[in-house]
Amino acid sequence: MRFLKQTIFALPVAGAFVLAAVAALGFLSIGGDEAEAQTTHTVFVNNSVFCGTAGSSCAQPFSVQINPGDTVEWLDGQAGIAHTVTQCSGDGTGCPGGSPGFGTAILTDPTPNYLSQSFPTAGTFFYRCEVHGNLMRGIVEVVPVSVGGIADFPDIDQSLADDAASSGGSSFGLAVVGGLMAALAMVAAAAWYAGRRWLR
């Protein structure tokens, strides 16, 4: 009879700790997937414009908005025309050549692309075609991911938003898991105490 009581007493205690471990592993796995999620954005290099569609005409500068860690790929959108993709400085109305940053040589119908460039940090990046000058310009806007609303408040240090975005909210996830494990541990302790009194 005493063995049966011990078995019944042990089951909820062991179950509480198992649930805590499973919850922790599952939550951290989800957080890791979110942190690794990245996107590749395509910009087509057309006749004399950068555009979101091959062969189309778009107002310049053509702007694309991405998140930190995303990649922009410039693809050939119209055959037989020489271009470059060259980062430049300026406010979007003028792009002097020769600025440091990403860039290509003068290329015609490159394979597989003109350039594939990742942007790990937030900021605004200007570029143009050195063959066509300021007539053919683009902007890449890298905006931080909003995690728990932190990026929506300008009075919060931007570095905190960047840290939260790059970690995929893992600090928040760890806090939730820790709270869950503490609650389950309290349940297990209460069950253990009650069980000892019952087994006497």
Image (cartoon, helix red, strand yellow):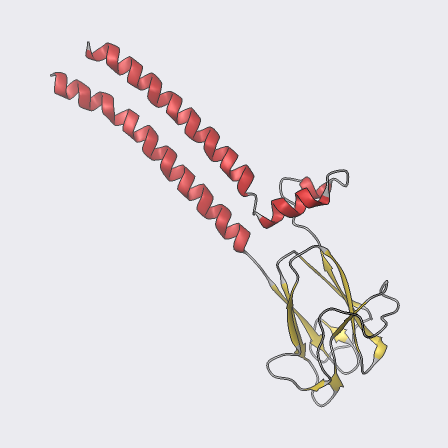
Residue at the extreme left of the image, as rendered: 1
Q: Position of residue 82 (x, y in %)?
A: 74, 87
In the image, residue 129 sits, relative to residue 140, either above or below, namely: below
Task: Judge by depth and name the residue closer to the eye, 108 or 88.
Answer: 88
Residue at the extreme bottom of the image, as rendered: 80
Task: Judge by depth and name the residue closer to the eye, 100 or 195.
Answer: 100
65 displayed left or right of 25 = right
The image quarter containing residue 43 is bottom right
Q: Position of residue 92 (x, y in %)?
A: 85, 65
In the image, residue 30 sits, relative to residue 192, either above or below, namely: below
The image quarter containing residue 94 is bottom right
Q: Position of residue 163 (x, y in %)?
A: 63, 46
Give the residue at x 28% y 29%.
14
Give the residue at x 23% y 11%.
198
5 displayed left or right of 39 = left
Q: Quadrant of the N terminus?
A: top left
In the image, residue 140 sits, relative to residue 129, either above or below, namely: above
Give the residue at x 62% y 43%.
147
The image quarter containing residue 68 is bottom right
Task: Judge by depth and name the residue closer to the eye, 108 or 79.
Answer: 108
Q: Quadrant of the C terminus?
A: top left
Q: Position of residue 110 (x, y in %)?
A: 64, 84
